[in-house]
Image (cartoon, grey):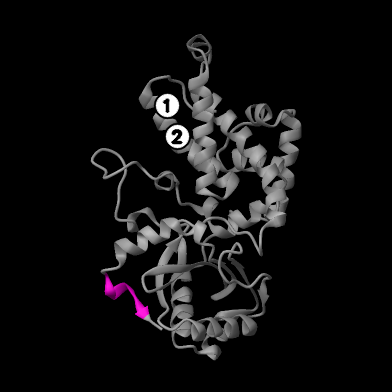
């Protein structure tokens, strides 16, 4: 796993890959960053003689980072049993919208989220599917199916035989049910725009038309803000719920934004991001909505909102 080399540039360049692996394993940029920093701390704590014995520091770092994530996934199950309401992955804005850059000349240190490749393997839909897997399944599946690491190397991470790791990945693949291979629905941005327009006008009938009758909406408030604790099922019920929210929050502004690389919506009030919503669209209608309201998961969006606050043309008051 990883690349060969021990120079500062080699080690720093490996960080991008590690952050990408860790975010997909954990669904949290903060936890991913902590895992990668822990792995680097363990590397630099090694005696120089031991470092020189390691032919591929990148492989060593990937193995250690993956093991740290595996441990975190095990403890996360217990934490999420105590979590208030549903737990959803931390959503990511498109880095081009943030108004800051990384690398030479940047105003400050690079945000680890800047380094995450926004492809189908970080869509909220896919990350939610990953949550249904056991920690070992998730590690085997992500490392093999997403990053193409061989099972012989994954075996070092999981402490199992390559054959056992292959079985874990196959089991995870069945759980995924082809979620990653499913292409983005053509016209998803148009469907999300229709949701935005109907929500702004509080038009229940229009919302019902754009929502699948069997649609499901899941909200994550983390106990920090008000949010429905159980999924709302059915297009009509979701439409009524969305209009009720608009009634309780005059001045709510809806913005069309990329959420984990897919068309989504951001709801803000008085310049403060309140909700980030991701969508799954099938046959021209919304089948799933994931609404993250937990402020702890929206810190990067607050920065993006501040950078955009002067652009009135991007916002429409409800």
312 versus 180 height, above or below = below
Residue that extends furthest to the left in the rendered view of this protein: 105
Near-viewer residue (116 or 229): 229
Residue positioned 59% across, 44% down in the render = 25
Query: Residue 169, can we see it?
Result: no
Left or right of 153: which side holds 198?
Answer: left
Q: Which residue is mark 2?
A: 15
Q: Does the stretch in magenta take in 67?
A: no
Quarter containing the N terminus: top right
Query: How many marks are shown on the rendered structure?
Result: 2
Q: Secondary structure at mark 2?
A: helix
The local crowd at label 1, few if under 14, some if 14 to 19, many if 20 or more residues have their Cα within 10 Å, is: some
Where residue 136 sits, quadrant-wise, is: top right
Residue positioned 32% across, 63% down in the render = 306
x and y percentages locating residue 250 in the rendered image:
44, 84
* C-alpha gap between disc 1 and disc 2: 7 Å
Residue positioned 57% across, 64% down in the render = 224
Near-viewer residue (257 or 51): 51
Answer whether labels 1 and 2 touch (C-beta < 8 Å).
Answer: yes
Residue positioned 54% across, 25% down in the render = 42
215 versus 46 height, above or below = below
Residue that extends furthest to the front in the rendered view of this protein: 224
x and y percentages locating residue 44 in the rendered image:
48, 21
x and y percentages locating residue 66 in the rendered image:
60, 35
Query: Residue 304, can we see it?
Result: yes
Q: Which residue is mark 1?
A: 11
The local crowd at label 2, few if under 14, some if 14 to 19, many if 20 or more residues have their Cα within 10 Å, is: many
Residue that extends furthest to the top in the rendered view of this protein: 49
Which residues make up the magenta segment?
Answer: 311-316
Where residue 207 sits, quadrant-wise, is: bottom right
């Amino acid at each position: 796993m990883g690349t060969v080399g021990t120079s500062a540039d080699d080690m720093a360049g490996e960080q991008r890959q590690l952050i990408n692996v860790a975010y997909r394993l954990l669904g949290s940029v903060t936890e991913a960053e902590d895992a990668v920093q822990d792995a680097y701390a363990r590397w630099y704590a090694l005696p120089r003689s031991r470092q020189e014995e390691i032919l591929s520091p990148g492989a060593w770092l990937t193995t250690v980072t993956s093991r740290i994530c595996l441990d975190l996934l095990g403890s996360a199950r217990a934490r999420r049993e105590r979590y208030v309401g549903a737990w959803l992955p931390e959503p990511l804005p498109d880095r081009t919208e943030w108004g800051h850059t990384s690398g030479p000349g940047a105003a400050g240190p690079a945000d680890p989220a800047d380094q995450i490749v926004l492809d189908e393997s970080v869509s909220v839909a896919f990350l939610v599917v990953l949550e249904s897997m056991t920690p070992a399944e998730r590690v085997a599946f992500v490392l093999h199916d997403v990053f193409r690491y061989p099972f012989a190397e994954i075996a070092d991470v999981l402490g199992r035989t390559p054959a056992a790791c292959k079985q874990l990945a196959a089991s995870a693949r069945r759980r995924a049910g082809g979620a990653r291979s499913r292409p983005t629905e053509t016209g998803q941005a148009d469907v999300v725009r229709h949701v935005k327009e109907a929500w702004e006008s509080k038009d229940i009938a229009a919302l019902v038309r754009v929502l699948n009758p069997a649609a499901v909406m899941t909200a994550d408030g983390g106990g920090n803000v008000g949010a429905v604790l159980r999924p709302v099922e059915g297009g009509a019920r979701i439409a009524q719920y969305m209009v009720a929210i608009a009634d309780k929050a005059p001045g709510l502004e809806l913005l069309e934004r990329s959420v984990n690389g897919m068309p989504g919506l951001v709801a803000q009030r008085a310049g403060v991001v309140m909700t980030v919503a991701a969508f799954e669209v099938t046959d021209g209608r919304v089948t799933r909505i994931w609404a993250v309201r937990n402020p702890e998961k929206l810190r990067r969006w607050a920065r993006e909102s501040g950078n955009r606050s002067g652009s009135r043309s991007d916002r429409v008051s409800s």
